[in-house]
Image (cartoon, helix red, strand yellow):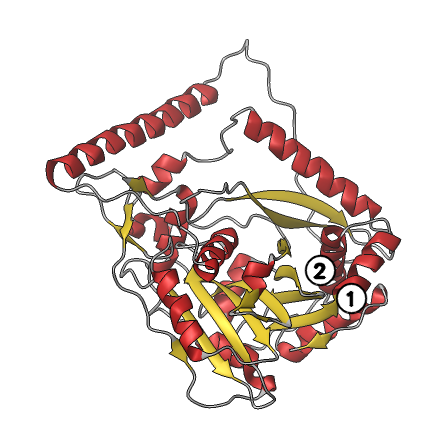
Amino acid sequence: MTRIGFADHLFLRMHHGIGYPVYNQFLWWFDESVQRKDLEKLRDNLSDGLLARRVTSPTVPPARERWINSSVSHPLDFHPEFIESSDVLAWADGRLGTEIDPETGLGWRLAAAPLTSGGMVLALTASHMVADGGALVAAFRSANSRADQPRLTPAEHGLAAVGSDVEDAVVQLRSAAGWLLKSAVAALPIPARPAPPPTSPRVGPRRSEVATDPATDSVWTSPHLVAEVDAATWNAVAENWGGTSNSLFIAILTAASAHAGRASMGDTVQWSLPVSDRTGADIRSNATKIVKIDVPVDDALDLSPIRSISKAAFTAFAARQAAGQAPAGISQALVQMLPDAVVARVPQPRDGAEGLASNMGVLPDDFSTVAGIRARAVSGRATFFGADAEFARALDGGLTAWVCEANGTVTLTVHAMDPDRFPGHRALEDHVATALSRWGLTAHFW
């Protein structure tokens, strides 16, 4: 029996209405059209893989929910009319929606639309509970190459299912009780115990004063863009300034945030960097951990400091993983036990990060090519569906971005979660374009 993980659980709560559902989406832009029959085969193959899963409740609380295979899936969403190139992002937004739901087994959808300029766009969208970025790539590659795909273990039934739930409930209770006991002991006033060294709180970035306009809040949606850059130029710039594609990516996001007024010179901003520990036969829907780095805001073009900061953070993270250190904070088992009604009333702490920077790297050919036709570019993103201005301010987040490289093209996909400094698409594009220009880069914006 396959139990859901802690990250799966958090994304499930978002579907329950505590927040907004989170979706991951890849977009392929083809200069030639892929035949519909080939797309139908691809959809059928995806329906036989690890995306075909549904979450079910345990028979014995507080056992964790479990994944079972889903026998249903959305049909291919093939747009009946040609769309303009300028409408691609709006069309992609329309592929999101609560009908993509991990509790119904309809947790993903494949869609395509022909372009008036020739070619087509393809979109694969999934609930983040069903698949993180790495899981989407793995599922698509297996389906696209028609390779044998790993499957969930068959669901148990009857007494076997009850017994499994009882066993898992005991494990969860023991874990939560152990954490509570450890926390209680740590709180005891024992004179012989050395006091922990004082820690200096992070100093938040100094942000520009921006007048809010409540009249526009009701119509605000998180603006997003895709910036397409020549990969050879991108990588040459990164190398020239002592960095890598990843450090250039982070530097551009930092510059865009600063240009928008979310930080001032001399500040540091914190970025969350997803790190995957997915293996070849992994059946987890989410196998991503977060590493945080603090990046200085300055006028320097040199990328080597960011490269060094990132390397040190990744090295420290790997050491903690190897040592089996549990993540800090409240017991994950306890969090999973709490009912939605309780969690909804608990103030959600801000983690202090400026945003998320997810680097998908160079995508393999069997991901960027469908039925022998290679995409001109591939973009990826994660987004809160339906997020409004109030929710964005509560998150206190700036930019959420993914970078991908395929077929000689780098795509930088950026969402903004600050309704006051990024009131719309034009503001976001201006800030990103300005940041790119600092390193002599220009982009084609979708």
What's the amino acid at mark 1?
Ala
Say the numbered circle drawn on residue 253. Answer: 2
Say the numbered circle drawn on residue 262. Answer: none
Residue 177's x, y, as percent? Answer: 33, 26
- Outermost top residue: 192
Residue 94's x, y, as percent? Answer: 45, 77
Residue 265 visible: no
Q: From this view, report whether residue 412 is shown above or below residue 157.
A: below
Q: Is residue 83 left or right of residue 201?
A: left
Q: Residues within 10 Å of mark 2 (few under 14, many from 20)?
A: many
At x 27% / y 61%, what residue is drawn?
104
CB atoms of marks 2 and 1 within 8 Å: yes
At x 77% / y 55%, what residue is drawn?
248
Q: Quadrant of residue 30?
A: bottom right
Question: Which sits earlier in the primary sequence, circle 2 or circle 1?
Answer: 2
Q: From this view, report whether residue 388 is shown above or below residue 32.
A: above
Residue 299 visible: yes
Residue 122's x, y, as percent? Answer: 50, 73
Q: Secondary structure at mark 1?
A: helix
Question: Which residue does the numbered mark 1 point to in the structure image?
Answer: 435
Image quadrant in which the N terminus is located: top left
Q: Residues within 10 Å of mark 1 (few under 14, many from 20)?
A: many
Residue 382's x, y, as percent? Answer: 52, 61
Front residue of 9/104: it is 104
Q: From this view, report whether residue 16 is shown above or below residue 113.
A: above
- Outermost left residue: 158
Front residue of 309/78: it is 78
What's the amino acid at mark 2?
Leu
Image quadrant in which the C terminus is located: bottom right
